[in-house]
Every structure is written in C-alpha cells, then in structure tokens.
Image (cartoon, helix red, strand yellow):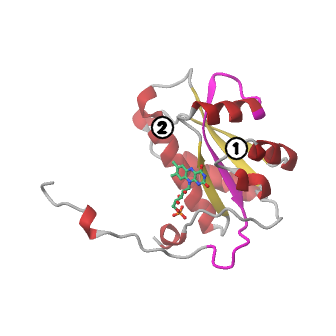
Amino acid sequence: METIQIRRSIRKYINKPLDKKAITSILQAAMQAPSARNQQPWHFLVVQDQEKIKEYAKQTTNARFLETAPCIIIFLTDKENLKTEAMYPQDLSAAIENALLQAASLKIGSCWCGTYPNPERMNIVSKEFQIPSRFEPFAVVGFGYPSEEEAFHHVDRFDESRIYYEKI
Ligand SMILES: Cc1cc2nc3c(=O)[nH]c(=O)nc-3n(C[C@H](O)[C@H](O)[C@H](O)COP(=O)(O)O)c2cc1C
C-alpha cells in the first residue's frame, strides 16, 4: 500500500542510467499482471539510446519531457496473436500500472504517456522506432531517477462521494 500511496508521475530525471537489474525487475512486475483469458498480450521495447529518445520526444506534444529520460519502455501488443482483442488495452494497462509501482518501489520515477488509441501518436512511435506493423504501440513510459526533492509523496484522492453501496 505504501508504494501505491507515494507513486507519482515523474517528468524530471537526473542523468543516471537504469541498470539491467532494475529494468528486468520492472518488466517482471509488468508480466505478472492479470489479462483476459490469460492472453498476456504484451511485448516491450526498451530504449536507452539518448539520441533516439530525444528524436522521438521532439516529435511529440504530450511527451516532450522524455528528452531527459534515461530509459523509455514502449508497451506493445502483437495484433496477430490475440485471443481476446477487445480486452488487450485493459491487459496492457494492468501491466503498465504494475511496472509503475515496481519502479516506485525502487525509487525510480516514471510517467505513462498515452499513445493508443490516438493514430497520430501511434504512427510517430512506430516510425521513430521502426516497429514492425504487427506490433501496435500502446503506450510509452519514461523511467529515471527523479530530480525533484519531493518526487515521491502522498496525495490523498480518496473520495467517499464516488462510492455506492448496493444501489447507484
Ligand atoms: C492513460 C494515461 C495517459 C497519460 N498520458 C500522459 C501523457 O501523454 N503525458 C503526460 O505527461 N502524462 C500522461 N499521463 C500521466 C497523467 O497526467 C497523471 O497520471 C495524472 O496527472 C495523475 O498524476 P499522478 O500520476 O502523479 O498521480 C497519462 C496517464 C494515463 C493513465
């Protein structure tokens, strides 16, 4: 619960790469997510090449801050191997949330940049990273050690007025 409470979207990173162990641990968490009919529709493109990341960030309106990210992970699905196509966005979302939480538990900042279902954003990702057409980019997530002092802090969003018991 503590990690859930302190996770924040972090968009300013210090210049320190993520090591392979941290990346693997984030991806292990992602792959532990539940998925419809256990289809596990996820694939991951890990990019640490700073030139490629900068070039991509420059082309976006929603993810400019990624320019300083030491690592991005592109969450993809393989459209040719889905058991329940309509459910894959939910599966990928569950995987991303697991990844964000695992990163926070390692004191690594992250920010989810929505890509699907915006065709323009999806095209930019596919083109910049030369992604084969069967793989659909779902989201780009930036990871890095935070530069803000108060990066991980709790913001209380609990709102009783959103809860209904038995009848709405
Ligand atoms: C589906 C989705 C898409 C998002 N897309 C972007 C994005 O394109 N750019 C961005 O800076 N943040 C993006 N975010 C992060 C949200 O802005 C952020 O989660 C929200 O403001 C709440 O702040 P918090 O994550 O610190 O709790 C996205 C979050 C989600 C869940």
Outermost residue on the bottom side: it is: 149
- Residue shown at 50% from the left, 76% from the top: 154
Which residue is denoted by mark 1 in the rendering?
60
Q: Residue at x 45, y 25 (%)?
A: 83
Highlighted magenta segment, given as a residue range:
128-151
**Quadrant in the picture for residue 13:** bottom right
Q: Nearer the viewer, residue 149 or 104?
A: 149
Whether tag 1 and tag 2 are in contact, CB under 8 A, the answer is no
Which residue ends up furthest to the front in the rendered image?
61
Which residue type carries mark 2?
Pro
Left or right of 83, for residue 142: right
Q: In the image shown, does 4 or 150 lie closer to the viewer?
A: 150
Q: Position of residue 115 (x, y in %)?
A: 59, 40
**Nearer to the camera, 11 or 71:** 11
Counting from the top left corner in percent of width and height, residue 85 is at: 45, 27
Disc 1 marks which amino acid? Thr
- The answer to whether mark 2 is within 8 Å of ligand 1 is no
Classify residue 115 as left or right of residue 36.
right
Q: Is residue 143 magenta?
A: yes
Q: Please tell me which of labels 1 and 2 falls first in the chain.
A: 1
User: How far across and how far down the image is residue 144, in percent?
Assistant: 73, 61
Instruction: Give the label, 1 or 2, closer to the camera.
Output: 1
Q: Label 2, on which residue?
A: 89
Q: Residue 7 shows which numbered tag?
A: none
The residue at 79%/67% (across/down) is: 14
Q: Quadrant of ligand 1?
A: bottom right
| Above or below for 155 versus 56 | below
Label 2 crowding class (10 Å Cα cut-off): few <14, some 14-19, many 20+? some
User: SS for tag 2?
Assistant: helix
In-front residue for pair 83/137: 137
Q: Is residue 84 visible?
A: no
